[in-house]
């Protein structure tokens, strides 16, 4: 839901991209510290001029790469799988009239304003690919017009981005956690086995309800976006 795909070290980056990456990597960091620390960082310490700064740089680079990866996974999983190539996103469903979360009067005003501002006609009852393309185009233009200066809209955007990217990070989370469970059984480490099992259960529960959660937050964002668009005065 960002206006562009460039990484900016702003509030959105830290909350919606960095934190989901950190959460997704918790099993990996535990696994690496317990079972592979001597094989990785202990070996690096024999290098000349090795310092903890180098250690921190490696971790930061890992977090940076993972934050980009889980954003890609999140967009593919959410927009493509959950919402069927953007066709069932709350913004799309509202403008089609399929999701009754705004009044008919507000929907009519939205369509008329979109037609006036962008010359995009959404008033007819067509629901084919052409109409979906028109709606996607209109929503993109609305985002640019409204921007994210509004505190409430920006907060909804950050919350949705956090949850979407956290969903995208589940693949990394589960792979690392399964390895952690496996190694904890091999080395008979009951506390780690219990911790990793609890994390796995938490991940499964989030995966089960993620679609419903994301849809609810997507509706909050869509309603605020359209409200801001309707009241925004043309310069």
Image (cartoon, helix red, strand yellow):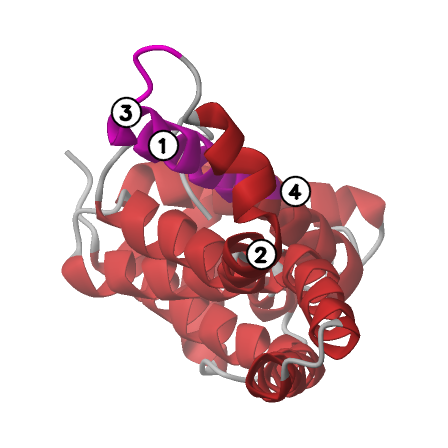
| Closer mark to the observer between disc 2 and disc 3 | 3
Contact flag, marks 2 and 3 (Cβ < 8 Å) = no
Q: Which mark is residue 55?
A: 1
> How far apart are the alpha carbons under marks 3 and 1?
7 Å
Query: Disc 2 vs disc 4: which is toward the camera?
Result: 2
- Count neighbours of disc 2 (C-alpha within 10 A) and say few if under 14, some if 14 to 19, many if 20 or more: many
In the rendered image, residue 62 lying in the magenta stretch gets the answer yes
* Residue bearing the label numbered 3: 51
Observer-nearest residue: 87 or 205? 205
Q: Which labelled disc corresponds to residue 134?
A: 4
Pinpoint residue 182: horizontal percent, then vertical percent. Answer: 78, 71
Q: Does 53 appear above or below 167? A: above
Residue, disc 2: 28
The quadrant where residue 137 appears:
top right
Which residue is at 56% across, 52% downward?
A: 32
Label 1, label 2: how many angstroms apart (C-alpha)?
Answer: 16 Å
Q: Is residue 65 above or below residue 203?
A: above
**SS class, disc 1:** helix
Cβ atoms at labels 2 and 4 below 8 Å apart:
no
Q: Are marks 1 and 2 in contact (CB under 8 Å)?
A: no
Residue mark closest to the camera, 3 vs 1: 3
For marks 1 and 4, the one nearer the N-term is 1
């Amino acid at each position: 839901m960002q206006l562009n795909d460039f990484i900016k070290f702003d509030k959105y980056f830290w909350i919606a991209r960095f934190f989901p990456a950190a959460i997704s990597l918790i099993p990996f960091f535990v696994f690496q510290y317990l079972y592979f620390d001597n094989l990785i960082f202990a070996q690096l310490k024999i290098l000349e001029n090795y310092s903890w700064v180098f250690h921190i740089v490696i971790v930061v680079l890992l977090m940076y790469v993972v934050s980009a990866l889980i954003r890609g996974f999140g967009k593919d999983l959410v927009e493509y799988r959950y919402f069927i190539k953007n066709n069932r996103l709350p913004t799309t469903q509202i403008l089609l009239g399929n999701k009754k979360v705004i009044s008919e009067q507000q929907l009519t005003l939205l369509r008329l304003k979109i037609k006036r501002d962008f010359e995009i006609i959404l008033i007819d009852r067509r629901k084919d690919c052409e109409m979906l393309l028109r709606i996607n185009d209109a929503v993109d233009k609305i985002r640019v017009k409204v921007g994210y200066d509004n505190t409430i809209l920006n907060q909804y955007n950050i919350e949705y981005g956090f949850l979407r990217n956290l969903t995208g990070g589940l693949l990394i989370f589960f792979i690392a956690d399964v390895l952690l469970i496996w190694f904890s059984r091999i080395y008979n480490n009951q506390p780690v086995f219990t911790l990793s099992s609890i994390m796995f259960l938490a991940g499964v529960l989030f995966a089960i309800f993620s679609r419903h959660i994301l849809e609810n937050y997507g509706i909050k964002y869509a309603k605020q976006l359209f409200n801001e668009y309707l009241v925004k005065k043309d310069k």
